Amino acid sequence: MIMDGNGRWAKKRFLPRVAGHAQGFERVRNIVEVCLDRGIEYLTLFAFSSENWRRPQDEVSRLMGLFVMALESQVTHMHRNGVCLHVVGDLSRFDARLRELIREGEERTRDNNRLTLTICANYGGRWDVLNAVNSWLRDNPGAPAINEEDLAPYLSLPYAPEPDLFIRTGGEQRISNFLLWQLAYSELYFTDTLWPDFDAAQLDLAIASYRKRERRFGRTSEQLLER
Ligand code: FPP
């Protein structure tokens, strides 16, 4: 999911943008509960892109504060509910406290398997692919070429299947450098609803839309009927 529209949600209420992010965090908590309830096994959220550093300094530091608070307050609750937490992206730019909380949260929840929650932070799809290729080249010096199967274990989410459904809130119809490789066959769903307003009923609408679609993976409809 790309959680877009926090700023506009706040602006409509004459509130500062950070109030929209705080409400966005409340929505994250709610949507995780809804996914647990609906039996969804993998949820991947784009929380901070590599381009988001360009935002005003105050907004960036308030977002970092929100991530710290989220980890401090939620990991115990996640653990009790069987959530396995992963945070992926270039974490080297985050401060030591945040990196330590991420490490502890991942370590504590690593054996849970009810819902695998991945937070993409300082993440970019192109970074993910390049990072994977470079890591593979380091492990395979002098190899003539790399193929798809070689790359998969080097990408940021080797533990997760490719997404069935991509959801972007907030009205824009773009992938914006999210999971470029992994979204190759995903169904795309865009809604004008702003992220803080994206509730259980909205998620159910997205799932209903997904269920109506025919996933052909390049085959014809007739071939699918024969299988
Ligand atoms: C996009 O809205 C949202 C973000 C860049 C930040 C996402 C963060 C959260 C939902 C809160 C915390 C999340 C976690 C996982 C702890 P925008 O600011 O671009 O909105 P706009 O397009 O209306 O300006």
Image (tube, rainbow, N blue to C red):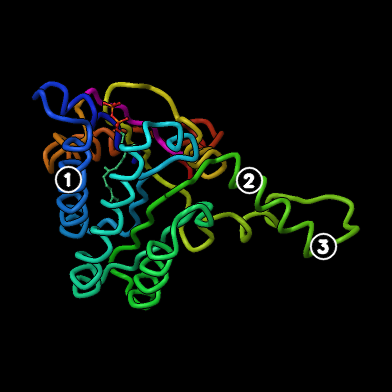
Between 60 and 226, the one nearer to me in the picture: 60
Between 130 and 102, the one nearer to me in the picture: 102
Furthest toward the left, the residue is: 13
Magenta-drawn stretch contains 191: yes
Residue 162 percent across, percent down from the top left: 48, 50
> Which residue is tagged 3?
140
| Crowding at mark 3 (Cα within 10 Å: few <14, some 14-19, many 20+) | few
Q: How far is the residue under mark 1 from the one under mark 3? A: 43 Å
Label 2 vs 1, first from the N-terminus: 1
Q: How far is the residue under mark 2 from the one under mark 1? A: 30 Å
Horizontal relation, residue 192 to residue 107: left or right: left
Residue drawn at x 15%, y 48% is: 26
Instruction: Tell me the element at label 3.
Output: loop
Asked whether mark 2 and ligand 1 are closer than 8 Å, the reply comes as no
Label 3 vs 2, first from the N-terminus: 2
Between 71 and 192, the one nearer to me in the picture: 71
Residue drawn at x 32%, y 36% is: 167
The boundaries of the magenta stretch are: 186-192
| Crowding at mark 1 (Cα within 10 Å: few <14, some 14-19, many 20+) | some
Residue 1, by quadrant, is: top left
Foreground label between 1 and 3: 1
Q: Amino acid at mark 1?
A: Arg
> Which residue is tagged 2?
129
Asked whether mark 1 and ligand 1 are closer than 8 Å, the reply comes as yes
Residue 138 percent across, percent down from the top left: 78, 61
Horizontal relation, residue 82 to residue 153: left or right: left
> Which residue is tagged 1?
27
Q: Amino acid at mark 3?
A: Asn
Residue 97, by quadrant, is: bottom left
Instruction: Tell me the element at label 2.
Output: helix
The reply to whether dot 3 and dot 2 touch (C-beta < 8 Å) is no
